[in-house]
Amino acid sequence: MSNTAQTYIQHLINIYFQQSDIEYAEWSREYLRNQFDFLGIRTPIRRKLTKQFMKEYGLPARNQLKEVILLLWDLPHREYQKAALDILENVKKTLLPTDMEWLEKLIVTKSWWDTVDALAPNIMGYLFQTFPELIQQYPENWIESDNIWLQRSAILFQLKYKLETDDELLFRYILRRADSNEFFVQKVIGWVLREYAKTEPEKIRTFVEQHELKALSRREALKHL
């Protein structure tokens, strides 16, 4: 650990620690099925603290970014993974194809919907749109993975693409996992279809009518049609 990265993160730790709330920490832990520990900082407060922190201490230098993010990811309280996501959102335009190797690890480490659903559409979605050659190397492998969070990310990364959605790719990924019994895969299929229906309602209606989807996926996809 470099002194620069350690010092940077310690400032954030000090700021967060002052706002910890034991009761809300327990509620948060139960909400995420007792998988993670929490300091107990409510989301609006955490975002405000993180914004103030980034304003005061700046964003990590390019050569420190990976170290800072991975160190935050390793910290025991969930708020630090959320801080890492906030930092990534603010530096994503500086990310390069070579960063995907370590960014991918964030999907499969301390995995749950609260981190994956930020990483896939916001960070990976931006990278794949900027560097489409990465799709062949990453989402094409993710959809074939046994890891449900990689599967979910492959289906989810185009969530915000709207008219720029590659629907042939999206539909192929969905059909590849349409028979999944995993709740988080069924749910994301419905979510992505529902979101894309805001742009292409008839395409989604036709797709759902013509293909066999799990009841949850179908219900979510057609919720607003």
Image (tube, rainbow, N blue to C red):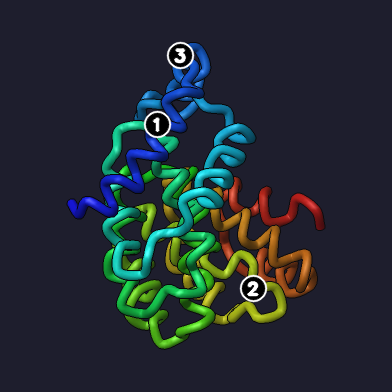
**Residue 142: where, in percent of width, then height?**
35, 67
Q: Amino acid at mark 3?
A: Ile
Q: Mark 2 = which residue?
A: 161
**Residue 22: where, in percent of width, then height?**
45, 13
Q: Residues within 10 Å of mark 1 (few under 14, many from 20)?
A: few
Q: Residue at x 64, y 73 (%)?
A: 161
* Mark 1 or mark 2, whichever is nearer to me: 1
Q: Residue at x 37, y 53 (%)?
A: 148
Please identify the quarter of the rendering in which residue 79 is found.
top left
Tell me which numbered mark, 1 or 2, is placed earlier along the sequence.
1
Q: Residue furthest top?
A: 23
**Depicted 107 relative to depicted 166: above or below:** above
Q: Amino acid at mark 2?
A: Tyr
* Mark 2 or mark 3, whichever is nearer to me: 3
For this rendering, which residue is in front, 28 or 180? Answer: 28
Q: Mark 3 = which residue?
A: 22
Q: Residue furthest bottom?
A: 133
Gap in angstroms between the C-alphas marked 1 and 2: 38 Å
Q: Secondary structure at mark 2?
A: loop
Q: Mark 1 = which residue?
A: 14
Q: Can residue 185 be seen here? A: no
Say which mark, if any, is on residue 179: none
Q: Amino acid at mark 1?
A: Asn
| Lateral position of residue 207 relative to residue 137, left or right | right
